[in-house]
Amino acid sequence: MDSCLILLSGGLDSVVATAMVRQSMPVRLALTFDYGQRAAPREIATAQKICAQWDIPHQLIEIPWLGTVSQSALNKTQHSMPHLNVTQLDSLSDTIESASKVWVPNRNGVFLNIAAAIAEANGIQWIVTGFNREEAVTFPDNSPAYVNAANTALRFSTMDRVSLISPTQGMVKSEIATWAKENAVPLNTLWPCYEAGDSWCRKCESCLRFIRATGL
């Protein structure tokens, strides 16, 4: 039977993607990346908790250099985190501006290539990630075109033809949240926030999309 490796941040999309694929294939490993992002401690703790609950081996990958080269508000505390209101989530101009402030250079490309090396070395065919149709509008590395392009590259860069899949990619956040509720995914234990406070900031775009989708 095929097996997979998960890119797990502890947020809604990656956790639901994990829940989906574990119904059909063995999950050999989950990777969480620390690239100096503000939310790293919370993301790591959440991913570890989910993996312990579902009996999935977990590995932390530290790539501090990515945070060093990035000028994103996710990494640089001297840059203000963009805050929106719920109505702005449907404004293309507002969300493009927000996305530009939290963009980390080639982040998903870096994650994917590290994951592909680990997958190939361990005989794992599938890399699973949590993308969604909603955020693909402003984050092109969430899009089907990105997955297709990545898989074209992986056919050349991995001898065993490791492939990237995203079972949540065709869904918007509300649909992902509905699936989560119907399948007993513990939504209130996830970490959707760009910050690492005692609780979600409820102001960043990631929080607002999560709250709108889940009603929490």
Image (tube, helix red, strand yellow):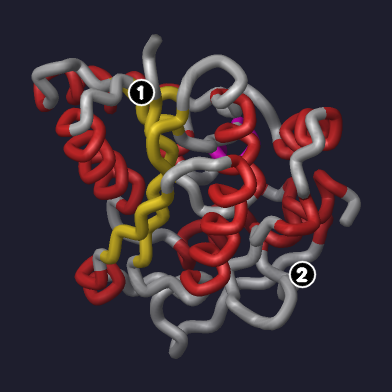
Residue 71 picture quarter: bottom left
Residue 145 lies, with reference to residue 17, above or below; the image says above
Picture coordinates of residue 26, whole percent (x, y): 46, 23
User: In this view of the protein, which residue sits in the foreground, 209 or 23?
Assistant: 23
Label 2 element class: loop
User: In this view of the protein, which residue sits in the foreground, 183 or 14?
Assistant: 183
Label 1 element class: strand
Amino acid type assigned to the residue bearing label 2 in the image: Arg
Residue 25 appears in view: yes
Residue depicted at x 59% and y 75%: 195
The answer to whether 42 appears left or right of 66 in the picture is: right
Range of the magenta residues?
133-137
The answer to whether 193 appears left or right of 44 in the picture is: right
Q: How many marks?
A: 2
Residue 202, label in figure: 2
Residue 146 appears in view: no
Sequence order check, earlier mark of 1 and 2: 1
Q: Quadrant of the N terminus?
A: top left
Picture coordinates of residue 31, whole percent (x, y): 38, 48
Picture coordinates of residue 91, whole percent (x, y): 71, 50
- Give the residue pinned by disc 1: 126
- Spatial separation of the CA atoms under disc 1 and disc 2: 34 Å
Residue 121 lies, with reference to residue 33, above or below; the image says above
User: In this view of the protein, which residue sits in the foreground, 19 or 9?
Assistant: 19
Q: Within 10 angstroms of label 1, few (less than 14), some, or many (20 or more) residues?
A: many
Residue depicted at x 54% and y 82%: 80
Question: Magenta stretch mostly in which secondary structure?
Answer: helix
Amino acid type assigned to the residue bearing label 1 in the image: Trp
